[in-house]
Image (tube, rainbow, N blue to C red):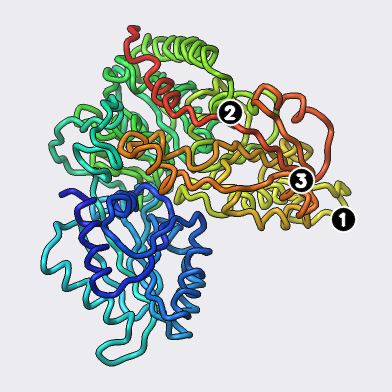
């Protein structure tokens, strides 16, 4: 069921029905619309817009001139960004369409990244809300679109206003067999992480009820030959103890919280992508691991027993492969894993470190992975990582974050509000310019991690689109006097998409138009406009001296980097041919 074919049919049908303008906000789930636009499925005015809120109000402006506009957004918080504009259009009786891309039904309510209840999100403010499950172009699809557009126009009777068309797409999200904008596919090699998972035989998931005492490890997990603990956002504070006692190595995403307690084995993606990863027979999952495809593939393997420890719903079990879900788990009393397994995994991590060192040493030194290493080495305080490439770069390339509190908005994995989030973290930890304890806000004096992080500057790392998306929050940083370094890794557009299938499916021109969406920003002037400090490092290697210099208050640090999308796959696959 080619998603791009459905996107073409939707756009061409809406154009036939009177759609005049399309404002496209870049995203991965919404990518079928980008490919359809690039192929000419819509003959009206179509243009990319970085910020969904801006796109929404631009559509309001278009509607006020008599145009009939549509805004296309990806799944998750991107849809919610349109709420103010939808309310304005509703009360002003202006017709506009919201085309929100969504996950298919099987990825809703299972903890999948960027999946939420977005169909009908605008409630009474939308004249109609249509939820389209993945489908082929058909007469029925045209009929549903006709009804949606009629509702937006207030026809045959009624009041004009906004209408949401929520469109679920299944993978693949790219055109099949042709590179968009090119005569051939260019011969790009497939990424092993994109390969289809092993055949799946359904098995029931047993869900244990909550209890006053944590479930016994011996009853739930038992013994294993090759076990792992995988920690995602919101991981249990018991994870390190589980690992220490059981012999299961602990693999953890940067923002899992597990690194603060130590005991984490680094380079999780390289390890599970290696031949050693194929030996894993048991995985204990804690928190929401949503960062990497290799981890998802591991948790989907039918030969792996998956134990999910989560007291809340929805727990993360995207493939439906979990054997058991338990609210809480006690540490084992004795080791429950093969005695040599942990040593082999540690050896694999050491080998990954060596190979990734060599990989980066042979490069330009100006990639996001180089920047992640430079920041980790030159700072000691809390880290706030942008939810796209920065958090992945730290996961792939940084050997240790032990003792560090690391934050990232991975709940919906959107780029929305990253600067404001970093300011809030600085305030919550007491990292602001006014240091008088007696007069500090009580919330700052009683912050969760105040004792360990009270005097340390917060360092936030984000891409240029993430910063541009939330630039107005620099005013909040200035007003609070937050002791905050905001590092903008500037690769001139949306580099995250280049590491996904879209980097291979689109020509450079099509990529830059619909996914890169580079913004022309003078960052030094931007910092001056908001009266915050500014510095520029022309390469990640220059960051150390900047970050270690004494400074107070907020500061914007501009670092031009290269996209170097190939490095992500090479770092992830660093151990693919290794033996342990």
Q: How crowded is mark 3: few (under 14 residues within 10 Å), some or many (20 or more)?
A: many
Identify the element where label 2 is drawn: helix
Which x, y percent locates residue 554?
76, 45
| Closer to us: 18 or 50 | 18
Q: Which of disc 3 and disc 1 is earlier in sequence?
A: 1
Identify the element where label 3 is drawn: loop
Q: Is residue 571 visible from the viewing direction of this image?
A: yes
Identify the element where label 1 is drawn: helix
Which numbered circle lies on residue 372? 2
- Which residue is denoted by mark 1 in the rendering? 439
Q: Report the residue that reaches farthest toward the bottom.
A: 157
Q: Report the residue that reaches farthest toward the left.
A: 139
Q: Which of disc 2 and disc 1 is earlier in sequence?
A: 2
Q: In which quarter of the image is residue 340?
A: top left
The residue that appears at 18% across and 30% down in the rendered structure is 198
The residue that appears at 35% across and 62% down in the rendered structure is 100
Which x, y percent locates residue 95?
38, 79
Q: Is residue 334 visible from the viewing direction of this image?
A: no
Q: In which quarter of the image is residue 577?
A: top left
Please state the total of marks drawn on the protein image. 3
Would you say the residues marked 1 and 3 are in contact, meaning their CB atoms lie under 8 Å apart? no
Which x, y percent locates residue 45?
39, 64
Which numbered circle lies on residue 554? 3
Q: In which quarter of the image is residue 98?
A: bottom left
């Amino acid at each position: 069921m080619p998603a791009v074919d459905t996107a073409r049919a939707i756009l061409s049908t809406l154009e036939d029905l009177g759609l005049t303008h399309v404002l496209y906000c870049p995203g991965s789930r919404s990518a079928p619309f980008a490919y359809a636009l690039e192929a000419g499925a819509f003959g009206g005015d179509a243009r990319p817009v970085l910020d969904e809120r801006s796109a929404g109000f631009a559509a309001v402006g278009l509607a006020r001139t008599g145009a009939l506009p549509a805004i296309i957004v990806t799944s998750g918080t991107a849809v919610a960004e349109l709420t103010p504009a939808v309310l304005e259009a509703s009360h002003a009786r202006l017709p506009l369409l919201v085309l929100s891309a969504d996950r298919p039904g099987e990825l809703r309510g299972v903890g999948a990244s960027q999946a939420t209840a977005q169909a009908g999100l605008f409630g009474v403010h939308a004249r109609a809300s249509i939820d389209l499950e993945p489908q082929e172009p058909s007469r029925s699809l045209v009929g549903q679109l006709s009804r949606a557009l009629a509702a937006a126009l207030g026809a045959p009777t009624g009041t004009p206003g906004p209408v949401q068309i929520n469109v679920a797409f299944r993978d693949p999200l790219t055109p099949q067999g042709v590179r968009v904008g090119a005569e051939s596919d260019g011969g790009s090699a497939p990424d092993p992480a994109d390969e289809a998972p092993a055949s799946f035989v359904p098995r029931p998931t047993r869900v244990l009820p909550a209890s006053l005492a944590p479930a016994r490890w011996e009853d739930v997990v038992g013994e294993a030959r090759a076990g792992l603990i995988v920690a995602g956002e919101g991981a249990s504070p018991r994870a390190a103890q589980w690992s220490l006692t059981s012999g299961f190595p602990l693999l953890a995403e940067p923002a899992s919280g597990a690194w603060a307690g130590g005991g984490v084995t680094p380079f999780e993606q390289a390890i599970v992508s290696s031949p050693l990863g194929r030996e894993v027979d048991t995985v204990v999952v804690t928190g929401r691991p949503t960062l990497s495809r290799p981890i998802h593939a591991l948790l989907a393997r039918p030969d792996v027993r998956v134990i999910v420890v989560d007291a809340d719903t929805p727990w993360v079990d995207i493939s439906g492969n979990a054997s058991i879900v338990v609210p809480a788990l006690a540490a084992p009393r004795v080791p429950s894993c093969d005695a040599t397994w942990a040593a082999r995994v540690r050896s694999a991590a050491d080998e990954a470190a060596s190979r990734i060192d060599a990989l980066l040493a042979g490069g330009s030194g100006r990639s996001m992975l180089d920047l992640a290493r430079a920041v980790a080495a030159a700072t000691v305080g809390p880290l706030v990582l942008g939810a796209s490439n920065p958090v992945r770069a730290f996961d792939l390339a940084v050997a240790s974050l032990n003792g560090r509190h690391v934050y990232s908005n991975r709940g919906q994995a959107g780029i929305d509000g990253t600067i404001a989030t970093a300011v809030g973290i600085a305030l919550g930890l007491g990292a602001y310019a006014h240091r008088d304890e007696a007069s500090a806000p009580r919330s700052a004096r009683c912050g969760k991690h105040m004792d360990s992080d009270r005097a340390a500057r917060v360092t936030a790392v984000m891409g240029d689109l993430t910063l541009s998306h939330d630039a107005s929050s620099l005013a909040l940083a200035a007003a609070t006097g937050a002791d905050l370094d905001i590092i903008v890794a500037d690769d001139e557009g949306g580099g995250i998409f280049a590491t996904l299938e879209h980097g291979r499916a689109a020509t450079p021109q099509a990529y830059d138009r619909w996914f890169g969406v580079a913004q022309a920003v003078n960052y030094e002037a931007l910092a001056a406009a908001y009266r915050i400090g500014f510095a520029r490092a022309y390469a990640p290697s220059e960051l150390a001296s900047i970050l270690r210099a004494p400074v107070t208050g907020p500061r914007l640090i501009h670092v031009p980097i290269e996209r170097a999308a190939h490095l992500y796959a090479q770092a992830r696959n660093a151990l693919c041919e290794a033996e342990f």
